[in-house]
Image: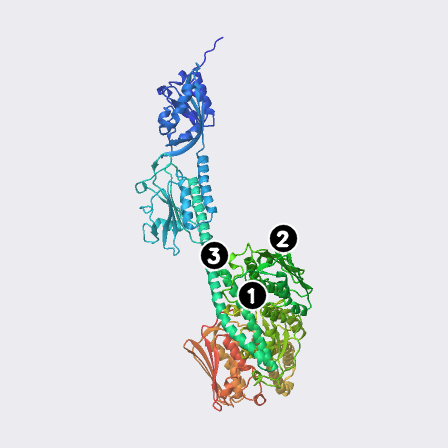
Amino acid sequence: MNQDVPPQTPETLFTGSSQMHALVRAHDWDASPVGPVASWPTSLKMLVKTLLGSRYPMILTWGPRLTQFYNDAYSLVIGDKHPAALGTDIRGTLAEAWDSLEPLVREAMTTGVASWVPALRLLLNRSGYREESYFDVSHAPAYDDTGAIGGMLAVCAEVTPRVLSERRMRLLRDLSAQASDTRSVTKTCGDLAKALADHPLDVPCALIYLRSEDGRSLTLCGAVGIERGGPLSPKTVLLDVDSREAAPYLRALEGERVLRDGLEALLALEGGPFGDSVGTLLLQPLAGAGTAAPLGVLVTALSPNRAFDEGHASFSELLSAQVAVSLRNARAYEEERQRAEALAELDRAKTAFFHNISHEFRTPLTLMLGPLEDVLAQVPVTEGARKDLELVHRNAGRLLRLVNTLLDFSRLEAGRIDSSFEPTDLAVFTRDLTGHFRSAIERTGLSFRVECGELPEPVYVDRQMWEKVVFNLLSNALKFTFHGGIVVRQEVRGHDVLLRVTDTGTGIPAAELPHLFERFHRVRNARSRTHEGTGIGLALVRELVALHGGDVAVESEEDRGTTFTVRIPRGHAHLPADRLQASRQRQSTAPGVRPFLQEAERWSDAEPAPRALEAASPLAEGGDRDAPRARVLVVDDNADMREYVDRVLSPSFDVTLATDGQAALAAARAQPPELVLTDVMMPRLGGFGLLRALREMPSTRAVPVVMLSARAGEESAVEGLEAGADDYLVKPFSARELVARVRSMLELSRMRRETLRQELLAQSLRESLQARDDFLAVASHELKTPLAAFRLHLERLERSLGDEALGRAKSPLESAGRQVQRLHALMETLLDVSQLTTGRLALDLNDVDLTAVVGRAVARLRDEVEKMGVTVTLDAGTPLVGRYDKQRIDQVVTNLLANAAKYGQGRPIAVCVAAEDGTARLTVRDQGIGISEEDRARIFERFERAVPGRNYGGLGLGLWIARQVVEAHGGRITVDSKPGLGSTFVVELPIEGLQAA
C-alpha cells in the first residue's frame, strides 16, 4: 500500500536549533544556483544536514558555481564575511586565498582524490585587514545521487596560534643563545640584530638603543631591516623633555609600551608573508638589573598581517626581556673585564713600585747595617748599649730580608729574574743549608732529622734560589711546630728529585690548602710562635721552584702536622739554555741564613723572665717617686718589641710582659692591671679578642686598653676605637710619646674611677633623700589622724563645760587649739614637701578670680596678724579670672603673709593685686629686716633661711613650696630686698591660666 510522501521543505529538513540551521531554513534557495530545497538531490540534503549537525568546521561547495554551505564552527573561520557568504560562490568569499585553495578544490572535484594539508598558510580578510593565518585542511569529493561528483566537502582546523607560538619561540631561543655567550656590548648588539634578521615575519625591522652613562641621550647600537640615520632610526636621540622626537623614547624609558601608527610612508618597508607595507613601530624599555634604570629602548616593527592582540603583546614583552638579559650579561662581562684590567694594571703598578722602592730601601739599609756591624765588632760599648745596637741590627736585617723578597717578586713579575743554573751536589748542599737551623730548632725542644742520601748525579739548580726555598720551608716549619720535631728528606724518584719538609705542628685547615701558595695569603687564627709575617714566603717558594721546571705540593692535617714536597726534574733539558752556568748581571738578593736564624732565635715558648727594677730614666723624671707605681700589662708576640716597651716603661711603672692574648688574659685574671698595652695581631688570641675578653670580666671591664699596631691610617684607628679600645698607637712611635700616652690613659682612668665614685655617692644621697621624703609622707598621714581626734576632743570638752568652768579654762583651751592648728599646718607642709619632691603635685585647675582668692586669704589672716601688732592693707582692683588651683594659690598668699609678719618687725604689710601686660601680679611688701644679696639667691630652696632658725623658728620650706606652686601654674616668683629696708615678693601668673591635666 503506497502512502503519499509530504513535500520536503527547509523547515522539515533542517530542524536544528543552531544559528546556521536557522539561516539555512530562512535562505531564499529558489534564487540560488542550487534551486529550491525540494529539487535538491537526496545526497545534497543529507550532506547539508550532516554538515549542520557537526561541531567541527566544515564547508560544502555544490555544483559548477561552487555554491557554499557551512556550519556554525566554520562561520568563525570567515569572520566578517558571515552570514553573507551562505549560498554564494566560495571564490568570492575566499578571493584573497583562492590562489592557495583552488588547486586543492579542483583536485578533489576532478579526480575524486581527497587531500590533507597541515598548517596551510592562507591570506584572509576576515577582520578588516589582510591577515596571516594557518589551517590544517582536508578536501574530499562530494557525490550526488547518481554517484557522480557533485561538489567538494572540506574539513579545516585553524592552527594559527600554534604556528605563531612555535615561530616566536624559535626567535626567543635564538636570542637566548646570544645571552649565554660572554662578549662585549657592541658585539652583543650585532649578534642580537643578526638573530632578529633571521625572523622577518615576526620582526620586520628592529632598532636597539642604549642609554648613555649620564642618561641624557640614546645611541643606536644595533639595527636590522632599516637603514641607520633615517627619520625613524636616528643614530642619536637627545633625551630632551621638550623634544617632540624624544617624547616616545622618554615614555618608553619610563616603562610605558609605546605604539606609533601610520608610518608607512616614512618606513617604506614591506613586511609579513604577503609583502604588505609596514606602518607600526613598538617602543619598549630594556630593563636594567633589579631596580636600576633601563638600559635603553628596543624598537620593533609590527607585522602588517597580524593584529597586536594579547598574544602579540606578551611575545613583544618576552622579546624585549630577552634582549635586555643579553645586554645585561654583556655589560656585566665588560664591567668585570674592565675591573680585571684595572686590577691587572694595579698589580703591574704595585710590582713596579715594589721594584723601585726595594732598590731605594737597600741603599739606606746597607748604610745602616755596615756601620752597625763595625761598631759591634770594634767599638767597646756598655752592655745596655750593645743590646740596643743588636736590636737595631736584627730588625734592620729583617727589613732587608723583606725588601729582598719584594725585589724578587718584582723581578719575577717583570720576567727579569737573574738566574744561573749550575750542576750541584744537591745532597751536600741541602745538608749544609739545613745544618744552620739545627741549634735554633733544638733550642725550642724539637727534634731535627735530615735524611739527604747521595744522588746519582749533580742536579742543576740556582744555588741562591734553592737556598731561599730551603730556608723558607724550614723557617715556616719551626714557626708552626711546638711539639715533636721536623724531618727533612731528599731523594730521587724516577726522573725527579724530591725534597720533603715534614713537621708535627698545628697543621692547616683543608679549606686553606688551595690558597696556601697565593701571595699575601695567611691562614687566619693559626697558632704560631709569632703572628708576624707577610704571607709571601710560600708564594716565593712556588715561583722559585717553577723556575726550576718543578712544582711544590702540600699535605696537612690539623693538629697532626704538615708536609711540603718540592719536585724538580733532573738534567737540564727543561731549563733555559742561556741560563745554564750563566754569569749574574744583578746584585744578589739572597740574604743568607743569618736573618732567618736571628728571627728564629727570638721565638720562644718561655714566659718573659722577671727583671729587677732599674734606676729611673730621664723619661721618668718629674714624677712622684713616693707615689704607688701603676701596674701596666704589655702584650706583644715580638720579643724585641716587648723588651723595648719594657725598657721604656719600667722606670715609671710596674710592667708585666705577656707573649700573646691568652697569656695576657691569664695574667689579668690573676692580678688585674691598671692599664693594658697590647699588639693587635698575635697568635692564639689577638688584640681584639683580648679586648673583648677583658670587657666581659667584671674585674677588668673598666681597665683602659691601648692598642699597638703597624696598620697606619684613620680607618685602622677607628676600627680599634669602635671595638672598645681607649687609645690607638701606630708603630713606629717614640719613647716619649708612649710614656705620655700611658700616663694620660692612667690619669683618665683615675678620673673615671673618681667620677664613678662621685656618681655612686650622689645616687646614695638621692636614695636617702627619697627615703626621707617617703617617710615624711607616711608620717604626715599617720600624725594627722590622732591630731584630728585631739581637735575633736578639745571641741567636745569646750561644749561640755559650763559657763563658769569655761571661763576658767578658756585661755588654756585656746592655747591648745592654736598648737593643734600649728601642728596641722606643719603636717600639711610636710605632705606638700613629699608631693613636690616626688613629682606627685597635681593641680585642681578651675576658672578662679585671683582677686577674690587673695582678698579672702588676707581677710582670714588679718585678725591673726593684727594680734602681732601688724596692719595689713589690700589694694585689689577688678577681678582677674584665670585657670588656677584655688587652694594652692591661697597657700602661696598665706605663706607670703606669714613670712612678712614674722620678719616685718611689727611694721605694716601692703598687699596688691593687679594686671600688667597680660599677667596677674601679686605683690607682698613688708618693712622688716630685709635680705642680703647672697641670701636672696637661696631663700627659695628647701630648708633655706635668710636668718638663723633659732631666732625666728620655721622649717625653711614656705618660700620653696610657694615657688613650686607658682611655677606649676606657669608663673614665677621673685624678691627685691635690702638689709634693713624690707622685702617685696612678686608673684606673676598668666591670666589665662593652664589647661587642666
Q: Does residue 155 appear to the left or right of 404 in the view shown?
A: left
In the rendered view, would you say 824 is above or below 711?
below
Q: Earlier in the sequence, mark 2 or mark 1?
A: 2
Q: Nearer the viewer, mark 2 or mark 3?
A: 2
Q: Nearer the viewer, mark 2 or mark 1?
A: 2
Report crowding for label 1: few under 14, some 14 to 19, many 20 or more residues within 10 A (C-alpha).
Answer: few
Task: Name the residue carrying label 3.
Answer: 340
In the rendered view, would you say 32 is above or below 437?
above
Q: Secondary structure at mark 2?
A: loop
Q: Secondary structure at mark 3?
A: helix
What's the mark number on residue 494?
2
In the foreground, 567 or 832: 567
User: Does residue 1 appear in the picture of this structure?
Assistant: yes
In the rendered view, would you say 792 is above or below 93?
below
Disc 2 vs disc 3: Cβ atoms closer than 8 Å?
no
Q: Secondary structure at mark 1?
A: loop
State the image coordinates of residue 506 (x, y, percent, origin top left): 65, 62
Report crowding for label 3: few under 14, some 14 to 19, many 20 or more residues within 10 A (C-alpha).
Answer: few
What's the mark number on residue 534?
1
In the foreground, 283 or 973: 283
State the image coordinates of residue 439 (x, y, percent, origin top left): 66, 69
Kind of residue at disc 2: Gly
Q: How many numbered discs sit on the rendered protein?
A: 3
The Cα–Cα distance between marks 1 and 3, rounded to whole angstroms, is 24 Å
User: Does residue 831 appear in the picture of this structure?
Assistant: no
The Cα–Cα distance between marks 2 and 1, rounded to whole angstroms, is 36 Å
Q: Does residue 774 appear to the left or right of 141 in the view shown?
A: right
Q: Earlier in the sequence, mark 2 or mark 3?
A: 3
Disc 2 vs disc 1: Cβ atoms closer than 8 Å?
no
